[in-house]
Amino acid sequence: MSTDRGRQPARPIASVRTRLAILAVAALTLAAALALAGPGTHSPALGRAAAAQAPPNVLVIETDDQTLESMRVMKNVNSLIGDQGATFANSLVNYSLCCPSRATFLTGQYAHNHGVWTNTAPDGGFGRFESLHAHDNLAVWLQDAGYYTAMIGKYLNQYENQPLVPPGWSEWHAVAPEPYRPYNYTLNDDGTLVNYGQRPADYEQDVLTRRAVDFVDRRTPEAQPFFLWLTYTVPHSGGPYHDPNRPTNCNNAPKPPTRYAHAFDSEPLPRPPSFDEPNVGDKPAAIRKRARFAPSTVAYIERNYRCELESLLAVDDGVRKLIAALKAKGALANTLIVYTSDNGFFHGEHRIAQGKMRPYEESIRVPLEMRGPGIPQGVTISPLAINADLAPTIVDAANAHPGLVMDGRSLLPVTRKPKVDKGRQMLIEQPGFEAIRTRRYMYVEYENGERELYDLKRDPYELESRHRDSAYASVERELAARLDLLRGCAGSSCRIQRADPPAPP
């Protein structure tokens, strides 16, 4: 397969042969440097030479609408990625919607800079992204750096196989134009459209896993490093389904493979204090007008939740198989592996039965675990991280050169010294509101003038907004000033680090 299929480079790149020759020279230089340095010598220059000698493979595994709470059932992900590397306890997304979030992953930019504002044209979707960033995004940068790039799974919303392979991708296996069908879907294999049926073996998540394992088996003997973005489509809801496979109780919900049908039939729906929130007088009008749940609504939320967990077990299986394939090929130690989701999801919190696109924790917090070269084993990172950090992290690991000014930062130094990221102030945005999330506070300003302010240390479930509390007036003024700075930020101005305003006694 061509390493430049669908590609129109924005700038010249070195051939793989040339790059490998450069790496060989770097290896000789490193050997000489080590001989001169002797044992016990540590030098940043030697670290860079070592990185040049063996650029890591990069594997990013992304789910769709997965919550942080659901990670408790991901035993393979937690044991094979998080326990072997870093778990980010407070990972956020700038905009909790599929296409804007994925555009942030591909650019390292907040939505107000990358310009993809929704899932559909004209202000969002694949067409909007391609018009702005087709030849300047993470895949292109990594190809320029000598990587063999591949995408397997769901790409951007409204991608419908035109072009057959977008620029920047050496290999392409996209589920399109209908990515949320568990059966009876089409897979674009490097421009060849392959239709799948409704046999249990055709289950979409398992097919994506088989494609990814096959990719690892084929590419790990190669000297050229790879970047693989594997995007599962669960636990996003789908349907209605017209297939005979079990389970039959997940219509209009995520559908698991037959082997996990009814695996969580007795699993209780989590009911935190914010579930079907009794008093929403402090909330914006859009929440206040929501009625309390009827028993049938609670039953619907619980059924959807159980189907989500069952579908995620297929992803957990896939992670186990991918790690085993990398290990069998001797490539595991030199592969940066990132596991995350594009956004969170509601399950009845704040009277929101389902969905995302709200500033509350259930919508903006996502799983983030990573392992790989230089990442300490078994660490939990408490400082805030955001999805705009993923592209800078990968660029850093690959020694690539971005064509855009990125708003996030590399998380690799943070895994080794978490305190370097202490005090970050994150921008949460979408049409209708802008918010600042700090370690302690969430402050939101809506375009209609409404506001919310939560002290997450005292109120982790966001039950009582303090925006009318005079004791928090100075806190609100300070957060409002910081939000003003973030609204139009770009690059380093998006990476504000300040101590939280002091809370009242």
Image (cartoon, helix red, strand yellow):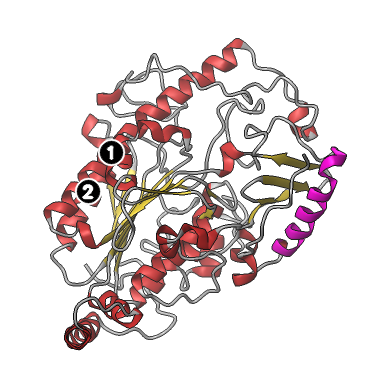
Residue type pointed to by label 1: Asn
Q: Is residue 235 left or right of residue 197?
A: right
Q: Nearer the viewer, residue 454 or 452?
A: 454
Q: Is residue 182 left or right of residue 137?
A: left
The residue at 27%/44% (across/down) is: 80
Q: Mark 1 or 2 closer to N-term?
A: 1
Residue 359 in the magenta stretch? The answer is no
Q: Nearer the viewer, residue 350 or 252?
A: 350
Q: Is residue 439 left or right of residue 420?
A: right
> Which circle marks residue 313 in the picture?
none
Q: Quadrant of residue 478?
A: bottom right
x, y percentage for residue 432? 73, 48
Q: Residue furthest top?
A: 295
Q: Nearer the viewer, residue 59 or 361?
A: 361
Query: Mark 2 Cα within 10 Å, few/some/many (few <14, many 20+)?
Result: many
The residue at 33%/56% (across/down) is: 376
Badge 1 vs badge 2, beta-carbon distance below 8 Å: yes
Main SS of residues in magenta: helix
Q: Is residue 81 above or below residue 25?
A: above
Q: Which residue is mark 1?
A: 76
> Which circle marks residue 323 in the picture?
2
Gap in Å between the C-alphas at discs 1 and 2?
A: 9 Å
| Quadrant in the picture for the C terminus | top right
The residue at 38%/75% (across/down) is: 400
Q: Quadrant of residue 373?
A: bottom left
x, y percentage for residue 222? 16, 68
Q: Which residues are magenta?
A: 469-486
